[in-house]
Image (cartoon, rainbow, N blue to C red):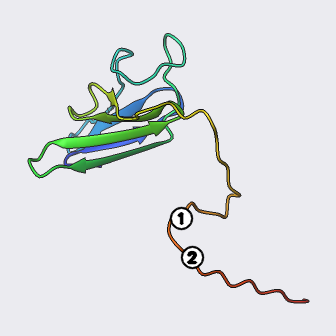
C-alpha cells in the first residue's frame, strides 16, 4: 500500500491496483503491454510478491517479484521495467520453517531423549 492505493500480486493477472477512498473502488487490471513478463498472450507470469513505497516527492515506487526477476513501476503500475540485471534460472528451496538470513550466526544445537 502506498498513499491512496493498495496493490495485490496475482498468479496470472499481474499486479492489481485498488484506488482507496472511492465509494465504488474496483481493482485495476494491467494492460498486457505494461512490461510485466507474459506467460502466454493473455496471462502474466506469476507475481510472488509486491511492495510499494511513497518516495520523498510523494510519487509511488512499486516493486514486483516473480520467476522472471524483479520489476518496478513509478507511474502507479501503468508501466513496468525490469530491474534485474540477469535472469536467474536456478532455484534454491528451504524447508517451510526456515528463513534466508545473511551474516554471521551462532547456533546452539540441543538434543534430548524425550
Question: Which-is-in-front pick, marks 1 and 2?
Answer: 2
Instruction: Give the numbered dot on residue 28.
Output: none
Tell me the SS state at disc 2. Answer: loop
- Left or right of residue 1, residue 93 in this image: right
Instruction: Give the numbered dot on residue 101.
Output: 1
Residue in view at x 86 percent, y 89 percent: 112
- Left or right of residue 53, residue 40 in this image: right
Q: Position of residue 53 (x, y in %)?
A: 25, 50
The quarter of the rendered structure image containing the C terminus is: bottom right
The quarter of the picture where residue 39 lies is top right
Residue in view at x 65 percent, y 80 percent: 107
Label 2 Cα neighbours within 10 Å, binned few <14 / some 14-19 / many ≥20? few
Q: Position of residue 6 (x, y in %)?
A: 31, 44
Residue in view at x 11 percent, y 47 percent: 58
Above or below residue 102? Residue 85 is above
Judging by the rendered image, the residue that carries numbered circle 2 is 105
* Callout 1 touching callout 2 (CB < 8 Å): yes
Q: Residue furthest right?
A: 113
The quarter of the picture where residue 85 lies is top left
Q: How far, Cα to Cα, is label 1 from label 2?
A: 9 Å
Above or below residue 89? Residue 50 is below
Tell me the SS state at disc 1. Answer: loop
Q: Position of residue 35 (x, y in %)?
A: 35, 21
Along the viewing direction, whichever of 8 and 102 lies nearer the viewer: 102
- Left or right of residue 26, residue 106 in this image: right
The quarter of the picture where residue 76 lies is top left
Along the viewing direction, whichever of 37 and 32 lies nearer the viewer: 37
Amino acid at each position: 500500500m502506498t498513499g491512496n492505493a493498495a496493490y495485490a500480486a496475482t498468479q496470472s493477472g499481474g499486479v492489481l491496483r485498488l484506488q482507496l477512498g472511492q465509494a465504488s473502488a474496483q481493482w485495476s487490471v494491467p494492460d498486457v503491454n505494461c512490461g510485466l513478463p507474459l506467460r502466454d498472450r493473455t496471462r502474466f507470469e506469476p507475481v510472488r510478491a509486491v511492495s510499494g513505497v511513497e518516495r520523498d516527492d510523494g510519487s509511488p515506487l512499486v516493486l514486483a517479484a516473480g520467476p522472471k526477476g524483479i520489476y518496478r513501476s513509478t507511474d502507479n503500475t501503468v508501466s513496468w521495467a525490469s530491474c534485474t540485471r540477469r535472469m536467474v534460472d536456478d532455484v534454491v528451496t528451504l524447508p517451510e520453517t526456515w528463513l534466508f538470513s545473511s551474516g554471521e550466526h551462532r547456533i546452539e544445537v540441543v538434543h534430548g531423549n524425550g
